[in-house]
Amino acid sequence: MSLRALRRPALYVIAALLFASAALRLGLGVGVATAETGAPPEPLACPAPELPAVLEALAGREERVEARELAIADRMQALRVAEAEFAERLQELRAAEAALAETIARVETAAEADLARLVAVYENMKPADAAALFSSMAPDFAAGFIGRMRPEAAAAILTGLEPSAAYSISAILAGRNANAPTE
C-alpha cells in the first residue's frame, strides 16, 4: 500500500471524530440550556429612573409622526386629484384655444376676401363715381382702399377727388409705414 492510500482512511476517521465531538457539545449544551430555563426569566429592572418618561415621550412623538404622515398622505391625494383636474382643464383650454384660433383664421380670411372683393368693385367703377364715393369717406378709411388698388385705378380716383382730400389720402399712404422698424 502506498502512503496516499493510508492517508485517506485516516482523514475519514479524523472527520468522523470532529463531527462526533460537535454533536456531543451541542447535545450537552442544549440539555443544560433547557434545564436552566425551566422558569421564565425575570424582567430586568430599569437602571435609569427617567427611562419611563423618555419612553412615554417617544410614544407621544410616534403618535404625532403617524398623524402627520396621515395628513401628508391626505394632502398628497388631494394634490393628485387637483393635478388631474388641472390637466383636464388644461386640455379643455387648449381645445378651446385651437377652436378660437381656427375661428379667427376663418374670420380673417373672410374679412380679407371681403376687402379684396370691395377693392375690385371700386377699381371697376367709373373713376368719377368712385371719386364721389371716396370724397364722402374718412381719409384714413379711403387710404386703406386706395393702398390696395392697382396704381392706374387709384390714380384715376385720386384725380377725381378735391385736391385737399387727395392730399390727405396721399399723406396717410406715405406715412403709414413711417414708424416701421428699419433693422
Image (cartoon, grey):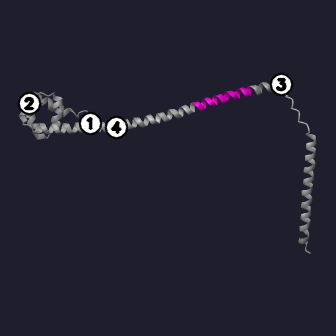
Q: Which amino acid does label 3 sit on?
A: Pro
Q: Where is residue 170 in the image (x, y as percent from the top left)?
A: 15, 32
Q: Mark 2 points at which residue?
A: 132
Q: What is the CA distance from the residue labelled 2 to the residue labelled 1?
A: 30 Å
Q: Name the residue under label 1.
A: 107
Q: Residue at x 42, y 37 (%)?
A: 91
- Give the Cα separation between the discs numbered 2 and 3: 112 Å
The percent coordinates of residue 51 (x first, y second) are: 80, 27
Whether the residues at callouts 1 and 4 have beta carbons within 8 Å, the answer is no
What secondary structure is found at the residue carrying circle 3? loop
Q: Badge 3 is on which residue?
A: 49
Which-is-in-front pick, marks 4 and 2? Answer: 4
Foreground residue among 112 and 59: 59
Q: What stretch is highlighted in magenta?
A: 57-74
What is the C-alpha distance between the residues marked 1 and 4? 12 Å
Q: Give the mark nearer the N terminus: 2 vs 3.
A: 3
Q: Position of residue 28 (x, y in %)?
A: 93, 49
Whether tag 2 and tag 1 are in contact, CB under 8 A, the answer is no
Left or right: residue 107 versus residue 70 is: left
- Position of 91 compared to 157: left or right? right
